[in-house]
Each structure stands twice: as structure tokens, then as C-alpha cells.
Image (cartoon, grey):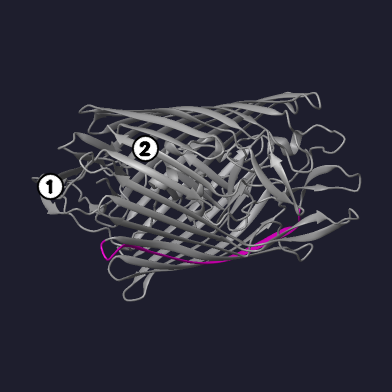
Amino acid sequence: MEVSGFVLNENLENLPYATISHPKSESWVIADEEGRFLLQAEVNSGDSLIFQRFGYRKNILISSGEKQLKIFLQRNAIPMDSIEVEGQNFTNSAPWEIIHITETDQMSSHGIFQRIPGSFLKTYGGRAGISNVGMDGGQSEHTKIVLDGIDLTSPQNGQTDLSDIPLAFFQQMFQSRSPEIDYGSGSMDGVIHLSPWFNRSYLNAETGMFGFKSMSTGYRLTFPKTALQLIGGGFSSDEDYAFSFNDSTYNRNNNGIDQTFFGSRIQYLHSKKTIIKSSLFLTFSDRGVAGSVSFPSLNADRTNTLSLANATLIKFLNSGHLSLHLSRRANDEQYSNPDVSINSRHEVSSHRLKMKWDQHFFEHLESITSLEFYDEMIKSSDIGNHNRSSSAASVSLVYNVTPRFTFRPSIRGDWGESFKATTTDYNIQFDIPKLGEIRGRIGNGFRLPTLNDMYWPEGAYSIGNPDLNIETSEYFSVGLQRSFLNKGQIEFKWSEKNTNKLITWAVGNDYKWSPINLNEVSRNSFNVSFSVPVLFKKLSVSGYLTQTKTKDKSTGKGLQYIPEYTGNLMLQYSQANVLLDIQIFYNGKRYYNGYDLSFNLTEIDLDPFTDVTVGIHYRIPMYNNVRLHVTIENLLDADTSFFPEYPEPGMRINGGMSIQL
């Protein structure tokens, strides 16, 4: 049984970089910057777990069989012997939600992102199609995806293509508490962190419909001061399928993909005061580019080599810590379409150096200061060679008036050769007995134009716009979280966002597409989410329902493709050696601007759909390390296409086997 949870201090603040070890298996892991951890080891009732960090008393916990824990460490003001305590269930008032990647998620196509309240997954058809995610009705350029501290955003288009990120690279997902302060440009709607906790040896093999084949393996080496994890594998899929369009049936061709990947992660405990961590992730993808239904690309091909690397040095102080983080994102993408004699290449890279100082000055006051340098470059056959550098500095104060009342004001400044931007965030959180935990936020954010936006060359149908203004936004949110039935929680959240000078591509009077700044766009969302970790000792239930209303104030209309209602229900049932996962995702009605039979521009409604994914996982008796898996995606065979011109394959069945080594 693997164990996850949080490490907190006596003021109920997250305690970063504590070490969690399981002496029986000799496995250990370092908690992240928010105090989260996932120990993928066979932890049984009665086993010892050791929690320790410099400046705090060691805590030895005797497991009582709980899968989720909240651990408190006390400051080591006076030397004392270690304390043994019984394991406690993870209380549901914790302010940092975690989404765990299930065995079903590992075999599906990014359905994990549909479990984030207010999110929507934008896809371009099948596994080979580009996939990205947006939040609260915003563009995908407003949401950052971060893997182990590495910003995955492409400076070329401001997006993260999730199809380039293997699901094996991460095992947990959560959102930043102060995204705009942490990451600046392009984080207006949030930052989704992917945690690569893979710290066990395993072998997985899968096969399925549409020619899908996959294999991956991981290996972990553990020493008293060093932990090394390696992961590698790949998959291929033909992705040729039938689809319906305008009351006719067609075949989707040239949509196959081959992908190989490799990842490594090392953690080194240099001393009680110093930790060094480093990660490397590589993927190579070769895929057909089917194009849209109206303008298919039957011979087009795209290859992309993506490399991600980082290194972090953490130095503990008596009342805080210093960290130095260096990361690099680079990709080499090549596109060819012999049908129209097009060959293009785009080499894009970005580098980030971030220094952070976290210090407790008094018992209830914490200061978090950072200085950051960011550089992005592109060498493209289409838009030429360009470079953009920026710097940023931020300060956050966390004032814990009492363990039930916290106030966190923050300010960040970004500046570059041709811009300056100031970001603020005010976060308040207090717990009222019998009512619940109330959270409120108010602040602003911004987004710089992408390199494509500014420098796309003039052609017959498109041209860039170097005179674009920076997008700016203001937001407000308030939420209430309440525990119930001891192990459950329910949360209500209201948020309002207003974006000025929204960058969007539009067709002009000359019939050319070009990016422009819209005057103002407003987005309001209301979300109800709940979770019951364990019900009747066998069933866990979680889900949400979100209403999102958008409005372009210059036209009075809502934004295209954005559903007013989305919802998710996740059921997990365990019985003896069988685990059953059922995920139900609802996507409401939305509209887009299309053309009628006379080629006049008109609004076209897209029907709502319900996407059901089922996973059955069976542990073979007498061979507890061997599991058999069957997953069914889109059980109802619904039309789940985000864009009608890029159809999805419908129901998909996969099967596989995994071995824990």
C-alpha cells in the first residue's frame, strides 16, 4: 500500500522538503515545496515511517493502514528523543487538494485533466492530435503546465501540448496557490503542477484498439543518501478510424503516432542542511498530421524532440531555507507536407534561473522572496530567429494570526526590453468552527504575446502583429470548504475574471487571419466539488459541477467552444483483488462561428456529451505483484470532439499487464 499526504509545522503551514522514509523497504522520498509526498512502497499496518527535516524534531509514525496522512513536525528548539505516534487519517480541511493518477489514467488519453474543476481539454483528434487544457473558460495560453518545476509552455505559441508528455512521467497533480506570483506571464488562470514521484521498479505492457501498443519500465536504486529513478518506454498507434460529418461517414487517415520517452530523477542528501535534486525528461514523437476534415493532409508528417531538464539546490536555515532552481525546456519540431511542398523547422528553447528565500522572522510571520531570470529563443524557418529576455522579483508575506486565520499579500514585478508588468495577489484564509474554511483571493495577472503572434510572416491567409499589447486581467474569488462524515468534504467556489486586450486570431476585411487585442472579456464561474475518500470501506466518490459564463463585452456574446456547464463524477470500488474505476465527464452545449450552405458566417451549436471511462484492475492471487488491466474509454461512444473539424475515434478498449519488481 502506497502512502501520500502532507507535512506541516505546528502553525498548520506546509513544511517543504521533509524526508519520508520506510525502513522496512529502505525506500525514501523528499516532500515537495508544498509539503506533499507520495511514498510508493508496500506500507502495511504496524510498519514504521520516519519523517525528518533539519530544524524539526524527528517523527516516527506507526502506520495503522491509512493511505493518506497529515504529519506535523515541531521545531527542534530543545533536543529531544524521537516520538512514536499512531497513524492518523488525512483530515479533510487541508487547503491543498491533490489529484492522484490512477491505474486507469495511466492507460487512457489525458482524462485525468477532466478531474480538475473548471477545466476543459481541447483536443485535435486521437492520440496523435495536439491536446491542451484551459481553465474557467479561458484560453490554454492562460494556464501553465509545470513538470517537476519545469515550465512546459512553448514560447512559440504559448501552449503546452499534452500529447508530448507521457502519463508515466507523473503520478500526482495539483494547482498552485499563487500562480501569478510564482510564474508571471501566462498563468492568469492557474498553474497545474505534475509531480514525478515514480519511485518504484515496474514493467507495464498494453495493447488496444486502433493499433495501440505500449510498453514502459521503471527502475529505482536507493542508497542511504542517494535515490535514483529511471523510466523509459514508448507507444505506437495507427489511429485510423471512421467518423461522421455532415450526415456522411468518412475514414480518418494519416493520424498515426510513434513516441519514445526516457526520464531520470536523482535526489541527494548531501547533509542535514543540504539537498540536491535533478531531473531529465526526453520524448521523441513522429506522427502523421491528418489536418482538418475540410482540408485533409494525407501525407503530412511532424516530428518533435522535446527535452526537459532541471537542477535544484536547497539549503536549510535555522528558520527557513534557500533554494536555487535552474531549468531548461527545448524542442526541435519539423513539419513536412509534400502535397503542397512545405518543409519547416522550429527550434525553440527557454531557460529559467530562480533564487528563492523562505524565512520565518517571528513565530507567525513568514517571508518568501524570489528573484528570477527568464530567456526564450526561437530559430524558425517561418518566423526567423528571435530572442526575448525578462527578469522578475517577488515578495510574499504569510501572516498566521492564529492557526485558523492566515493572510498572504504578494507582489511581483516583471520587466524586459520593451515591457513592465506588476502583479499583485491578496489571499486570506480562515476557519470558522461549525461553518468551515473560507478562502478569498483578489489580484491581477498578465500575458505577453507569443513569438508566433508577433512574428508570423505575411502570407496569402495570415500575418503576425508586432504591435500587440500585453493582456491584463483582474480576478476575484471566494470559497467555502466544509468537512462532513469525518472523511468527506464539500467546497463551494465563486470566481470572476476580467481580461483586457485579450489576444485572439481573427479574420480581417482582407480575409487574412491576424492576432488582435479584444477590448474586454469577462468570465464568471461557480463550482461545487466534493469527495468522500472511503465509504463503506470499499467505495470512494468524488466529483464537481461547474457553471461558466463568458462574455466578449464588445459584442455581448459568449466565447466560442466554451461550455456553460461541465461536471465530473469519479467512483472507485475495491473488492478483494479487484479495483473498479468509473469516471463520468459531462460537457455542456457550446457554439462556434461556422459557415452555412451559402458560405455566410453563422453561429453553430455543438451538442452536449457525456464521456464515460471504465477501468478494471485485477491482482492475481499468489502473485501480488502482477496485475491485469482493462480500460474502456468513451463507453457510450459519444461524439467528444472539441472541434468538429477534428473528430475523435469514439469508444476505445485497451488491455494490459503490470508487474511491480
Q: Which mark is residue 381?
A: none
Residue 302 vs residue 127, the one in the foreground: 127
258 over 438 or under it: above or below: above
Mark whose residue sits in front, 1 or 2: 2
Identify residue for label 2: 657
Identify residue for label 1: 78
**Percent x, y of residue 47:** 14, 45
Residue 198 in view (yes/no):
no
Residue 461 vs residue 108, the one in the foreground: 108
525 within the magenta span: yes
488 within the magenta span: no
Magenta part, dominant SS: strand
**Percent x, y of residue 484:** 32, 71
**Percent x, y of residue 605:** 73, 62
140 over 638 or under it: above or below: above
Look at label 1 and name its amino acid.
Ile
Chain part drawn in magenta: 518-537
CA gap, disc 1 to disc 2? 51 Å
**Percent x, y of residue 339:** 79, 27
Look at label 2 and name its amino acid.
Met
